[in-house]
Amino acid sequence: MKISKRQLRRIIKEEKAKLLKEYGGAEETGSYLIGFAQAYASLGAAVQEQINAVVNAYYLGGGPDALDDVIYEQNPSALSMAHDKLSRPLRDLEGEDAEDLKSMFEEIAQRLQDMGEM
């Protein structure tokens, strides 16, 4: 089966659009922060609430045990999905806050793995 240049361009354009939609799409806006925000918004309210609880425990909580308790109370599939959707746009961000978030997600992933949930 032969594919014309026009068909190949269309296929590439469609696949690129799918990837941008799935992983945030910073290339569309030119801003990695907006790309991260779009990825976060795509999680949905229920998953966002769970991520917010973990973020609050991470930044405001009473140490590793408190973080473990909050992670354990969340849906592991939701945390795993958030990790998957936010990892790529988060990698593109720079700065101290971005590094803190990267560390937090690495710690969440490790703790879920230790609990046998990820």
Image: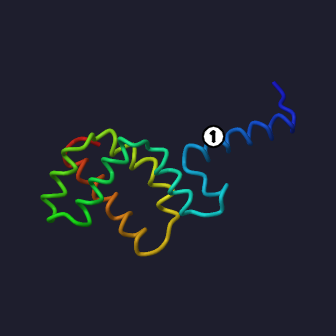
Locate residue 20, reporting x and y percent: 62, 47
Secondary element under disc 1, as helix, strand or loop, is helix
In the rendered image, which quarter is residue 101 located in?
A: bottom left
What is the crowding at mark 1: few (fewer than 14 residues within 10 Å), some, or many (at least 20)? Answer: few
In the picture, the quarter occupied by the N terminus is top right
Left or right, 29 with reference to 85: right
Residue under the point 60% across and 44% down: 21
Residue under the point 19% across and 51% down: 70
Picture layout, residue 118 above or below residue 107? above
Locate residue 27, reporting x and y percent: 65, 57
Instruction: Say which of 87 and 51 sits in front.
Output: 51
Tag 1: amino acid? Lys
In the picture, the quarter occupied by the C terminus is top left
Q: Which residue is mark 1?
A: 18
Locate residue 69, reporting x and y percent: 15, 51
Instruction: Say which of 38 and 90 sits in front.
Output: 38
Residue under the point 21% across and 42% down: 116
In the rendered image, which quarter is residue 63 located in?
A: bottom left
Locate residue 79, reporting x and y percent: 33, 46
